[in-house]
Amino acid sequence: MADETREPKIKDSQIQAFWQRFLKVNPRNQSALTYEDAWSFGDTPQMADELAALVLAGKKTATTSAAALYEIEQEALPQSGTYSVLLDGSDVPRAVLYLESVSIVPFDEVTAAFAFLEGEGDRTLAYWRRVHEAFFRRAYASAGLSFHDQMLCVCEKFSVVYQEDEGHDFQ
């Protein structure tokens, strides 16, 4: 997936421990809660750290990935109403995200309002298009595809439902 191209390097047990800490403070029916995935943003550890920091600061409440890459990787598209664990650039769990909504739109139809929710740069649509086109060109090239402005984007809106202080010991 475009935003989730790196496999976590940490042990699943660290993710499970983080998830268990979330369940302890979550008032919902804990036995019914599961997470779909543990992932990080972008295609470099630096990008993952920068974007995770925006999430943790409350500025980033949306993300975009490429629908074609889900098909190539034979992965299901994200579904609203699910949880995931956000990892930083070192693959340390940083937050539990709740996926509020998912829509699929062509790249050139992503709105200024959605670009603002992504929280990146100056939060304008022009900035969003510039950085996402560059990102998608790299992701598409590595998959043997050619970027075009009608490529289908998976636009996700999420909320942070759990995060821990940076100083927490995850070992």
Image: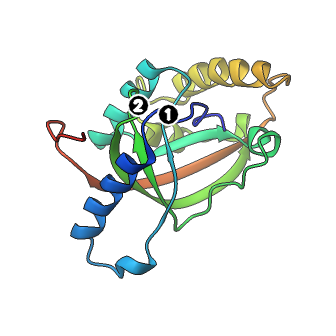
- Residue 152 x %, y %: 77, 41
Mark 2, Cα crowd under 10 Å, few <14 / some 14-19 / many 20+, is many
Instruction: Report the side of 100 relative to 28 (left or right).
Output: right
Q: Amino acid at mark 2?
A: Leu
Q: Are marks 2 and 1 in contact (CB under 8 Å)?
A: yes
Task: Name the quarter where the C terminus is drawn.
Answer: top left
Residue toward you, 113 or 7:
7
The residue where tag 2 is placed is: 51
Picture quarter containing residue 20?
Answer: bottom left
The x, y position of residue 95, in whole percent, is: 33, 48
Q: Is residue 160 visible?
A: no
Residue that appears at 73% across and 50% down = 75
Q: Position of residue 122 (x, y in %)?
A: 40, 24
- Under mark 1, the amino acid is Phe
Q: Nearer the viewer, residue 11 or 89?
A: 11
Residue drawn where x is 58% and y is 37% of the image:
4
In the image: residue 111, left or right of residue 12: right
85 over 170 or under it: above or below: below
Under circle 1, the secondary element is loop
Residue at image mark 1 = 41
Write the residue at 37% across / 25% down: 50
Does dot 2 land on a helix, a strand or a loop? Answer: helix
Q: Vertical placement of 150 versus 165: above or below?
A: above
- Residue 100 visible, this angle: yes
